[in-house]
């Protein structure tokens, strides 16, 4: 079978033009896909998880229902359960995870807390002048990448949205766009840029503040290793472009200044709107991490780091975010769904997951599944089950099922756990 | 023994991203993720050649990985996201939820120690000696 216009759920670009060829219940080819996407589609059947529980100190394979019963028992007994992950699944499963969190009085957090959590903190403080990727394609003549590396993390971003595509008012494609790249090191993205500006590590806030001062007409000195002439030249470009956009990544969110650096970036964009049209978009990583923020916000009022122990949602990143809860050793059970914290959290946080009964719902053998007491295999969203995912600019796209799976989708697994907890 | 003080940053690479889809217990994943990328002069200073083992030490922990030459400035080193860099990153989020995964001060020195396998990393996380 050939399926056209399939959405890839690997990164926040959610490319929706993948042509998937299936043969004998496997994906045989994924046309138009980038290296990551091809690897995801073609390896979907490899390294699959099995239903496992720890019995008498030994991990044993069990029927799926037994793993679900055990998971419900663990969650019912827990005084302070943590539900974490959600970024690699679809929105129905995300909604049910929130329902389960409310039912058991859990803390619920998504992978935002370790990617663009600081972006949300800054946006809550000062707002963000955003736009869609379609507007970037059709209008942007100045594109700034800051602290991100799309050539290695969002591989088709450049060709679909930001550098080469020809759009309504960008008929000449790359020739009509100026590309600026700000980072602490040369990467594959620097080769795609017209101007590469090397920033001293950890000094983005200083540089962004210097840009803001220059936009307001003040004389500025050198900042973050960038000469004042370069700052002035770039500010002239920013003020005189027709439609500018800053795409920023974890180079801003994961360094010392965190939300304060992003706050400065959001305010720079706001200031630039006194002169021209300027926008800013975070380069969201996982396929539906953006959806996890939207779903949690619809359901609880808050995008991540929410606690239900009082019976109503309380939001406090730093207190109810997963790394903090784990590093302080507070939770006494964890349900990890559609993410792999042991591969991405500081080891100190992962060690607590190994000490408590951790339940993992994942299509594949993840590093977290190797330290878990209960593993529940699931169908892969966007390949083996349908649903909805949100692109990095907040646009929802429909995911398709192209392969039948022996496993249940995340949403069915969560429904069953909820029923068992209520029983 | 010569060591080099660096600012350690972590991030995604194409090889890390594609090999994790093959499986995080695969040899490809370990080969592509248990590495550190350094400036050639920094490698010379500590006496490490391409693919030789180096120990990365921070105040949070240490990890042994293979060394790769890269076009990165002196004094900066890069490790792909994964369990090896997790061993040298602290869990303090300063009230934000986000640990400092980029910009950590580290010492790098050449070593004869082996790179930990995924199985050993998992044992270490579980507290099994």
Image (tube, rainbow, N blue to C red):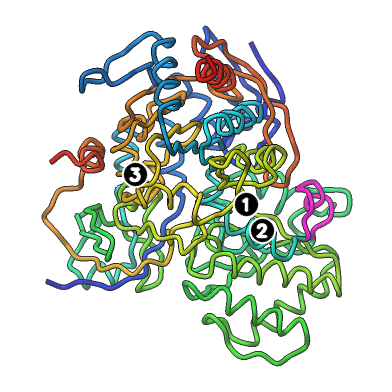
Counting from the top left corner in percent of width and height, residue A129 is at 78, 60
Question: Disc 2 sits on a residue from what chain?
Answer: A
**Residue A350 got which mark?**
3
Tell which of A128 and A423 is nearer to you: A423
Counting from the top left corner in percent of width and height, residue B82 is at 37, 46
Which structural element holds mark 3? helix
Instruction: Give the mark nearest the N terminus, 1 or 2.
Output: 2
Tell which of B46 and A224 is nearer to you: A224
* Mark 1 vs 2: CB contact within 8 A: yes
* Horizontal relation, residue A210 to residue B116: left or right: right
Counting from the top left corner in percent of width and height, residue A375 is at 38, 23
Going by the picture, which residue comes out furthest to the right? A168
Instruction: Give the mark nearest the N terminus, 2 or 3.
Output: 2
Above or below A420: residue B57: below
- Name the image quarter holding the N terminus of chain A: top right
Q: Residue A262 lies in what quarter of the image? A: bottom right
The nearer-to-camera label among 2 and 3 is 3
Rate crowding at label 2 as few (under 14), some (14 to 19) or many (20 or more) other CA atoms within 10 Å.
many
Q: Residue at x 64, y 30 (%)?
A: A95
Mark 1 sits on what residue?
A283
Mark 2 sits on what residue?
A247
């Amino acid at each position: 079978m050939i399926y056209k216009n399939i959405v890839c759920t690997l990164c926040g670009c959610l490319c929706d033009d993948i042509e998937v060829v299936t043969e004998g219940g496997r994906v045989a080819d994924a046309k138009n896909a980038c290296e990551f996407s091809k690897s995801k589609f073609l390896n979907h059947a490899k390294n699959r998880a099995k239903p496992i529980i720890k019995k008498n100190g030994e991990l044993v394979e069990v029927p799926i229902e037994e793993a679900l019963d055990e998971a419900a028992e663990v969650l019912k007994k827990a005084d302070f359960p943590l539900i974490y992950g959600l970024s690699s699944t679809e929105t129905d499963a995300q909604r049910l995870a929130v329902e389960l969190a409310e039912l058991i009085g859990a803390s619920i957090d998504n992978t935002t807390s370790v990617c663009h959590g600081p972006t949300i903190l800054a946006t809550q403080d000062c707002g963000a002048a955003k736009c869609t990727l379609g507007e970037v394609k059709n209008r942007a003549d100045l594109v700034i990448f800051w602290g991100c590396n799309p050539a290695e993390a969002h591989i088709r971003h450049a060709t679909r949205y930001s550098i080469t595509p020809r759009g309504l008012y960008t008929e000449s494609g790359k020739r009509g766009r100026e590309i600026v790249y700000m980072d602490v090191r040369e990467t594959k993205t620097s080769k795609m840029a017209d101007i590469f500006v090397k920033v001293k590590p950890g000094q983005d806030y200083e540089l962004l503040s210097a840009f803001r001062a220059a936009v307001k007409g003040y004389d500025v000195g050198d900042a973050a290793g960038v000469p004042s002439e370069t700052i002035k030249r770039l500010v002239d470009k920013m003020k005189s472009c027709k439609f500018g956009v800053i795409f920023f990544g974890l180079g801003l969110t994961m360094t010392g200044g965190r939300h304060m650096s992003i706050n400065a970036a959001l305010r720079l964009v706001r200031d630039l709107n006194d002169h021209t049209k300027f926008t800013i978009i975070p380069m969201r990583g996982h396929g539906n991490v953006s959806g996890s923020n939207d779903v949690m916000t619809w359901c609880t009022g808050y995008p991540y780091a929410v606690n239900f122990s009082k019976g109503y949602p309380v939001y406090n990143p730093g207190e109810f975010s997963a790394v903090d809860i784990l590093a302080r050793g507070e939770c006494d059970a964890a349900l990890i769904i559609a993410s792999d914290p042991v591969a991405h959290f500081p080891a100190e946080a992962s060690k607590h997951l190994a000490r408590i009964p951790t339940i993992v719902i994942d299509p594949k053998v993840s590093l977290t599944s190797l330290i878990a007491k209960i593993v529940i295999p699931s169908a892969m969203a966007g390949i083996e089950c349908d649903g909805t995912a949100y692109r990095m600019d907040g646009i929802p796209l429909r995911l398709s099922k192209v392969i039948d799976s022996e496993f249940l989708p995340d949403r069915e697994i969560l429904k069953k756990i909820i029923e068992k907890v209520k029983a | 023994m010569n060591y080099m003080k660096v600012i350690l940053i972590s991030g995604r690479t194409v090889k890390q991203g594609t090999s994790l889809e093959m499986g995080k217990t695969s040899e490809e994943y370990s080969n592509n993720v248990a590495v550190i990328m350094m400036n050639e002069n920094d490698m010379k200073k500590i006496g490490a050649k391409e693919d030789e083992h180096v120990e990365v030490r921070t105040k949070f922990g240490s990890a042994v990985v293979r060394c790769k030459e890269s076009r990165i400035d002196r004094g900066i080193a890069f490790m792909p996201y994964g369990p090896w860099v997790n061993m040298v990153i602290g869990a303090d989020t300063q009230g934000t939820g986000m640990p400092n995964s980029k910009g950590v001060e580290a010492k790098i020195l050449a070593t004869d120690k082996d790179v930990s396998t995924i199985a050993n990393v998992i044992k270490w996380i579980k507290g099994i000696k």
